[in-house]
Image (cartoon, rainbow, N blue to C red):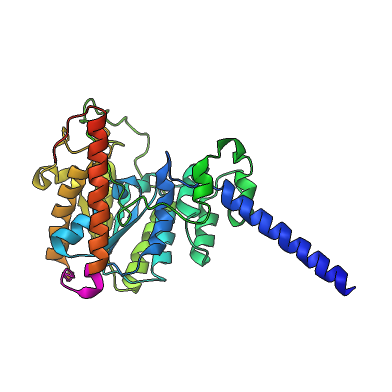
Amino acid sequence: MKKKVIRYSLVAVFVGVTLFLLQRLLMPKYVDDVVEGSLISEYYNETTDHDVLFVGDCEVYENFSPIKLWQDYGVTSYIRGSAQQLIWQSYYLLEDALRYEKPKVVVFNVLSMKYDEPQKEAYNRMSLDGMRWSKSKIDAINASMCEGESFISYVFPLLRYHSRWSELNANDVKYMFSSKQISHNGYYMRVDTKAAENVPTGKALSNYQFGDNSYKYLDKMVKLCKDNDIQLVLIKAPSLYPYWYQQWDEQMKSYAERNDVQYINFLDCTKEAGIDFNKDTYDGGLHMNLDGAEKLTNYFGKWLTDKYDLKDHRNEEEYKSVYEEKIKFYEDMKLDQYNELKEYGKVVSY
């Protein structure tokens, strides 16, 4: 009897280890084309706290540079951003972050208010798979699942990715148990340029009112910040597309006034920030390139430090060595991207 128990136990361990290894192999590594899927998990590698946390979609992780915020103002910050991050995902990612630290300011980009219900599983995965397990992750999954998704496939991703055999490459093996750093405190760097030309105007909508579900989670975010003595700043990044309607802007202004939070529409501030949409965007006005992100960050950094009591940490030993490494990685990637552009015959200056 004892031998049978041992034998069955060994078989169970073997099966468990095999399934675990298969799962690690088959899960997307997000180091090739769709690198944004790595952004959420990178947060857990941080070793210092942050004065400012950004949450939101690509309009934060491609438009603001935490390294520039450090260089210009000594403010520590991180972007917990992901592709098409929905407002309930932003809320639960913030809730998750508060398990590790308590920032002085939280910045939320309001474009996702336009979505009142789950949208697409692929984007859900990029926002949720990288979260560590907690009640916040469980609640985020339940709030985000589209029709046909199952909670168990988030617990055991092998059930979702078991058919990826034909897509496997060398990186799937290389990064089974480690990850390649993609971002700079959550910022996704691009140095190339594509001027904003022929940007489409917004089509008339039958209803401009943001949905009840979006407002429910915005209310929860306001309460969470107030309960933790955190200043909440609502922003609309200066992206020309997707179109930001005046009716949406008025709703955010009104909401901010009623709830005693700040709201900034950076589309109204591009001239003051020095942004040139002929030079400072890499994809025709959807997102800033590095030059645009650094200009916007410098402008916003001045506003933040004028408005709130944010300490300059640049002379503090706890942070100096950490940010020296971060700046080196930032500058090395910038140089690599410029050199790659030169290799392909694109004229750049730096």
Of residues 79 and 20, which is closer to you in this image?
A: 20
Left or right for 149, reference 83: right
Residue lying furthest right: 1
Of residues 177 and 281, which is closer to you in this image?
A: 177
Visible in this render: residue 261? no
Judge whether 88 appears above or below 278 on screen: below
Visible in this render: residue 179? yes
Residue drawn where x is 37% and y is 44% of the image: 114
Quadrant (top left, top right, bottom left, bottom right) of the N terminus:
bottom right
Judge whether 50 appears above or below 39 on screen: below
Of residues 98 and 229, which is closer to you in this image?
A: 98
Residue 98 falls in image quadrant: bottom left
Of residues 36 and 60, which is closer to you in this image?
A: 36
Q: Percent position (x, y) of residue 326? A: 27, 59
Quadrant (top left, top right, bottom left, bottom right) of the C terminus:
top left
Left or right for 177, reference 264: right
- Membership of 325 in magenta stretch: no
Residue lying furthest top: 198
Judged by its main secondary structure, the magenta piece is loop
Left or right for 150, reference 227: right
Residue drawn where x is 36% and y is 44% of the image: 209
Judge whether 107 appears above or below 318 on screen: above
Q: Percent position (x, y) of residue 250? A: 24, 47
The tally of labels here is: 0
Q: Percent position (x, y) of residue 276? A: 13, 37
Left or right for 292, reference 24: left
Q: Magenta segment range?
A: 310-320
Residue drawn where x is 31% and y is 69% of the image: 48
Q: Percent position (x, y) of residue 151? A: 61, 54
